[in-house]
Amino acid sequence: MPRNLGDVADYFLPRAGGATAAARRERAQPVRPPWRAERPAALPIVAIPVGDRDVLRAAFAWNLAVEVARLGASAALLAPQGEEPSPLWPESGPGPVGSEVVLTQATGLPELARAALDLAVSRAAESDAGGLVLVRVPPAWLAGANDARALLRWVLLFTAGEPRDLLETYALAKAVLVRHPDARIGVTVHAARRLGDAERAFRSLAAVAARHLGRSVVSYGLLVDDLHVFRGIVARRPIGLEHPQSRAARALRDVARLLLDDARRWHVA
Amino acid sequence: MPELWLSPAPPRRELVRELRARAGELWPALRVIAEEVLGADASIDWVALEPGGRAVVVLVGEAGQDLELVARALAQRAWLEPRIRDWLQLAPRIGLRPEAGVRALLICPVFRGEALAAARSLGPEVLSLASYRCVRDGSGVSVLLEPVGVAPGAQGVAAAPPPALEPFRTGLTDLDLGLTPEERREFEQLASPGGGAE
């Protein structure tokens, strides 16, 4: 019996292509990291503003966590517990390739920041290869972001290239930077038809941020909204495992690698 | 010519399949986009789409279930309305328009006075009714479907409301963004032909 959003959408979206169990097992083996970082006290935290019903960006966040895990690092996705079952996430608990979804009872940014720190410390103690804690931040909470420096040191914003999407993304960046001027704001562009469109969108956003906020934003690449993304959302299966050779999966892997590289660089620095 | 007899309804699965075929003839503009959707604690038989982008919750009931069906229709309509935007994210080109709302269509053998009064009170933009009869025609059973009151195909297409500024994907609205007119202008320029900061 169909149960919720993913199942409903299954009626008008094709099912994910069937991969054999053996192939899935093979893909699910984590890749050993090319480095072996010194164990940090806490994993870096990346805050990702995602709306309550933004299934697309939630799917990107979750798939990024899986890709980080596929790169051999620890990956946890922390989110405030909303309605159950959530339209955004798979059930909480261990997920593919050692990734993990953790839900918290936090009802505001300070509580969420504390939960994120706790998770970052505990996962650092368990991880030899470093990793990341990705945290879904309800965008409305950013308005009271004065007390969440630990959480908002590093923020990743997903944006489409349309002017209205860029406006919204700029506003989120501004909400963070006016309260935490030293925050690192990363931007990943999605829904671009061509690479040039994505580059133009990023440059436009970066230029406005520089003019009005006196700060630049950092590019974290490009994600592709191809059909595999939607199939993955419907099936609640990570794109990187279901369709590892798809453009969407390769793009996610690139973004995950950029994040991990920066996490490692910061730790060493 | 074989004689026609009123007949008990066939098993539900068969009945619903027959009704769907009849509904397609009666309201050809309605397009079924989902079946057996588990909505507010119970199944929605179909979710259909009107040409104007309005979603239609269709519930099929048996004799004596008409009043229950009215309550269920309102519950399922309330359940579906906030989910339209989620569906749109997954199938942006399906044609749904969240601002067009959701209507319910109830299909039942007979509607009693209270159900009719409820439908009248709610109006065809919220609830419309159709009745069915099962008829034995020789060896097979045919289902006859007819609208009660306002036919959705005739008047049920939602008129396009005036364009309103959509909330952002994050759920924030323009008022929440806290931007200055100068900042907004930067992005308006991007939208204009030839716009685009380099």
Image (spheres, grey):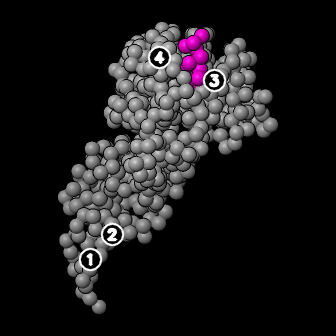
C-alpha span from label 2 to label 4: 59 Å
| Disc 1, SS | strand
Q: Nearer the viewer, residue A182 or B184?
A: A182
Asked whether residue A225 is in view, the answer is no
C-alpha span from label 1 to label 2: 10 Å
Residues marked 2 and 4, same chain? no
Q: Residue at x 64, y 31 (%)?
A: A221
Residues marked 1 and 2, same chain? yes
Write down the chain letter for disc 4: A
Q: Residue A171: x and y, percent?
A: 61, 22
- Closer to the observer: label 3 or label 4? 4
| Residue, disc 2 | B18
Q: Residue at x 51, y 38 (%)?
A: A56
Q: Quadrant of residue A4?
A: top left
Is tag 3's residue or tag 4's residue first in the polypeptide sequence? Answer: 4
Q: Amino acid at mark 4?
A: Leu
Q: Residue B132: x and y, percent?
A: 29, 67
C-alpha span from label 1 to label 3: 62 Å
Q: Are marks 2 and 4 in contact (CB under 8 Å)?
A: no
| Disc 3, SS | helix
Write down the chain letter for disc 2: B
Q: Are marks 1 and 2 in contact (CB under 8 Å)?
A: yes
| Residue, disc 3 | A170
For the C terminus of chain A, which image quadrant?
top right
Q: Amino acid at mark 3?
A: Tyr
| Disc 2, SS | helix
- Segment colored magenta: A259-269
| Disc 4, SS | loop
**Is A260 colored magenta in this rendering?**
yes
Q: Amino acid at mark 1?
A: Val
User: Is disc 4 surrounded by few (<14), some (14 to 19) or many (20+) residues within 10 Å?
Assistant: many
Give the total number of marks visible in the rendering: 4
